[in-house]
Image (tube, coloured by chain):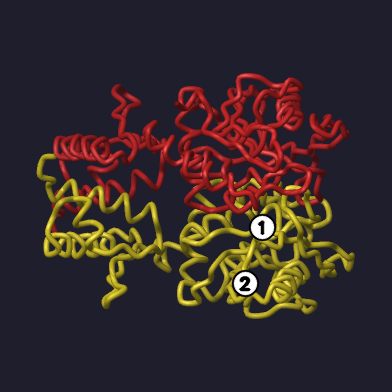
Chain colours: A yellow, B red
Amino acid sequence: MDRIKRNERLAALTKLLTASPNQLFTLSHFCEMFGAAKSTLSEDVDILCDVYKRFGLGRLDTVTGAAGGVRYRPYIEREQAVAFLEGLCRELQTPSRLLPGGFLYLSDILSMPDIVRQMGIIIAGQFYDEAPDFVLTMETKGIPVALMTAQSMGVPLVIARRSSKVYEGSAVNINYVSGSSGHIETMSLSRRAVVEGQRALIVDDFLKAGGTAKGMIDLMSEFNVQVVGTAFVMATAHNAKRVIHGEKALMVMDEPEGGKLSIRPAEWLL
Amino acid sequence: MDRIKRNERLAALTKLLTASPNQLFTLSHFCEMFGAAKSTLSEDVDILCDVYKRFGLGRLDTVTGAAGGVRYRPYIEREQAVAFLEGLCRELQTPSRLLPGGFLYLSDILSMPDIVRQMGIIIAGQFYDEAPDFVLTMETKGIPVALMTAQSMGVPLVIARRSSKVYEGSAVNINYVSGSSGHIETMSLSRRAVVEGQRALIVDDFLKAGGTAKGMIDLMSEFNVQVVGTAFVMATAHNAKRVIHGEKALMVMDEPEGGKLSIRPAEWLL
């Protein structure tokens, strides 16, 4: 094989690191791959650190010590995150998005890959230190953003279902009260989906009273899993009936008044 | 701003191009961003083309003409795709994955970001020429792989639901016969989710008789949308009752016999 030039190594390193976010690679791993010395790779990593910083492309962390190496974490700078969410809020305030009953049409936004990717990166950025073992969501609309959060964190996604399915094997079912409607609903999770002692990050699309999120927290306690955080794409403002606390929502929505929608980026982001 | 070195430009270009797969960027766009001449950027692109080819990192296409530019498409080479699927098949043949009723436990695999990302890239690679406007799936288990397929193709994901929801607005509902059970089921899609005349790629997790896929095809014809292909993670082998044809499945599974699972990569891949 020809000697690989620095140019080429940097491009290849970028692709490899960004394809496996939050995974620690040893320098030796790359030395072998490229047939280059450790000092050379170390210089490569320094160059990439600078480039990523300069272009706002995420963070390249060097972890020292025996279990050390280099790790890429997608990251969106605060100003960029706010600009992205402000753009979304403008789009979501289009009057035609207001549905009968005061509901907001959000489904298109919630399954556009590039939009949910950015949402996932912003959410993940808040929870790296909590080191969750998996991301949990309740079907259906939160799945894309939860998947992208899981991808950024390099952990699996776990999906709770509305009822147990034959192809999920034995399952734990719980009943919970939907906060907004007051109805009793069921939530089901395959017994083999998670392992006792793990740490869960809950990600979902919409927070009103929080009945579903509370259900997920209760479900996790059945599995002896600790919930290390809750994040949502959208939350309603000033909900006195809310049963969960400490959540991170990306956007906040006022109760629609006279057919007018008011949506803004959440305060903790500003 | 300091003059940006080639090294740095290549790393930044790689990140920008891979973050927006299948999107055409004009060279002028990058010239402005980096303050570099068109001839310089043109050389950069040539270098990256070679690097990606050499490391199997996807394809960088240069499109000529007035509407031309450069476009990144994720791509997994055939041998790599087969090796990846062979590894998955081995994992899926673990006896504990066989559930009562002959069902296969697949949910964990279907929501691991890195696995569904690779599946999405392999599926997308088969359908770039069909130029779908969106990827369609039916909730729930196929959503992650369908989202990743949509991301690779740079198009939105559209999710059909089992029933119409207040937050989806007015919807088109159809009834269809679930091929395996013979039961009548309902499928619902918001009227505003798709536009007449668009082209759809159907992606789902499991193909048995194909009742659900047939339902999605019928649903699309209600919207005057053309289905340009159907793809699945897994299909059962030799299903005489199958009601759809021409599908691409990644893996094929024999009817479990005496508790033994037999799963292999699909033949069209070999």
Q: Amino acid at mark 2?
A: Thr
**Subunit bearing disc 2:** A
Tell if the residue under mark 2 belongs to the same chain as the one under mark 1: yes
* Residue B19 image offset from top left, x and y in percent: 39, 48
Q: Which residue is mark 1?
A: A159
Q: Nearer the viewer, mark 2 or mark 1?
A: 1
Q: Which residue is mark 2?
A: A230
Tell me the element at label 1: strand
Residue at 18% x, 61% y: name it. A47
Residue at 59% x, 41% y: name it. B157
* Residue B43 image offset from top left, x and y in percent: 16, 36
Mark 2 or 1 closer to N-term? Answer: 1
Residues at marks 2 and 1, CA–CA distance in whole angstroms? 15 Å
**Subunit bearing disc 1:** A
Q: Nearer the viewer, residue B196 or A73?
A: A73
Q: Amino acid at mark 1?
A: Ile
* Residue A130 image offset from top left, x and y in percent: 50, 76
Horizontal arrangement in the rendering, residue A224 relative to residue B87 (left or right): right
Quarter of the image with the N terminus of chain A is top left
Residue at 76% x, 58% y: name it. A170
Residue at 83% x, 30% y: name it. B176
Relative to A164, does residue A245 appear above or below in the rendering?
Answer: below
* Residue A48 image offset from top left, x and y in percent: 23, 60
